[in-house]
Image (cartoon, rainbow, N blue to C red):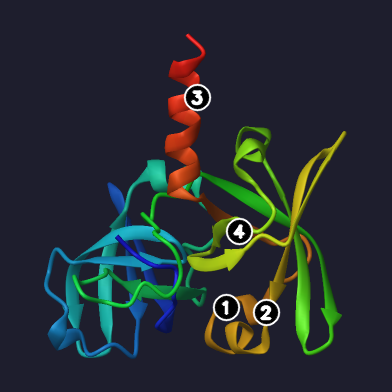
Amino acid sequence: MFTGIVTDIGSVTAVETRGDTRVVIATAYDTATIDLGASIACSGVCLTVVEKGPGWFAVDVSAETIGRTADQWTRGQRLNLERAMKLGDELGGHIVTGHVDGVGTVVSVAEEGGSHRVFVRVPADLAPFMATKGSVTVDGVSLTVNSVEDGADGTVFGLNIIPHTAAVTTLGGIAKGQRVNIEIDVLARYLQRMEHYRGR
């Protein structure tokens, strides 16, 4: 379980295909405090630490995960990192599982005051879960949805990236055309499931 509050920006230093894909990630975390088998969210994807050393850890990424996430499994790619919550931790964002629901595409980025206004198009199956002032996770970052627009070419939601978020996450470099990992609010997921059964 995570909160969507990024605590480090790591970078992919090696990628090796051996059945699954072994990805080595450089980090500022004290890896002596990370157990093998621990979960770390990597740009919103919950992965298991399978190897580690000073300043780095490695994860195995399945073909299923690669097929369902954005283009982040390449050498030099920067990743938003978050270690799993501990009981008693402050819930600064919202409840995040690290299970990506789909991939969105950035349709525009514009400066607005000191912030950036970002618009992201999502697949049709995620559209019902986008709600103004609701929560969404984009590349592992907990954000508030500012607007939702349903149109003939799909659903686009708007975000405001404040300077602090831009500075401590990879979203400071977000660009038009970029693919991003989307996790919907877990509460919305359960509400949809309940509505499905209520209508039967």
Q: Which residue is mark 3?
A: 195
Q: Report, in whole angstroms, how far the alpha carbon at label 4 lies from the one at label 2.
A: 12 Å
**Mark 4 residue element:** strand
Mark 4 or 3: in front is: 3
Contact (Cβ within 8 Å) of mark 2 with mark 1: yes
Residue sitting at the far top: 200
Q: Report, in whole angstroms, how far the alpha carbon at label 1 lies from the one at label 3.
A: 36 Å
Q: Position of residue 144 (x, y in %)?
A: 62, 64
| Residue drawn at point x = 44 percent, y = 46 percent | 187
Q: Report, in whole angstroms, how far the alpha carbon at label 2 lies from the one at label 1.
A: 6 Å
In the rendered view, would you say 120 is above or below 63?
below
Q: Which residue is mark 4?
A: 180
At label 4, the amino acid type is Val
Q: Report, in whole angstroms, how far the alpha carbon at label 3 lies from the one at label 2.
A: 38 Å
**Which of the marked residues, 4 or 1, is nearer the chain's N terminus?**
1
**Mark 3 residue element:** helix
Q: Which residue is mark 2?
A: 173
**Quadrant location of the N terminus in the rendered image:** bottom left
Label ID, residue 170: 1
Q: Is residue 134 visible to the viewer in this orientation of the structure?
A: yes
At label 2, the amino acid type is Gly
Contact (Cβ within 8 Å) of mark 4 with mark 3: no
Q: Position of residue 163 (x, y in %)?
A: 67, 88
| Residue drawn at point x = 33 percent, y = 47 percent | 62
Q: Position of residue 23 (x, y in %)?
A: 34, 66
User: Crowding at label 4, few (<14), some or many (≥20) Cα neighbours within 10 Å?
Assistant: many
**Which of the marked residues, 1 or 3, is nearer the chain's N terminus?**
1
**Which of the marked residues, 4 or 3, is nearer the chain's N terminus?**
4
**Which of the marked residues, 3 or 2, is nearer the chain's N terminus?**
2
At label 3, the amino acid type is Glu
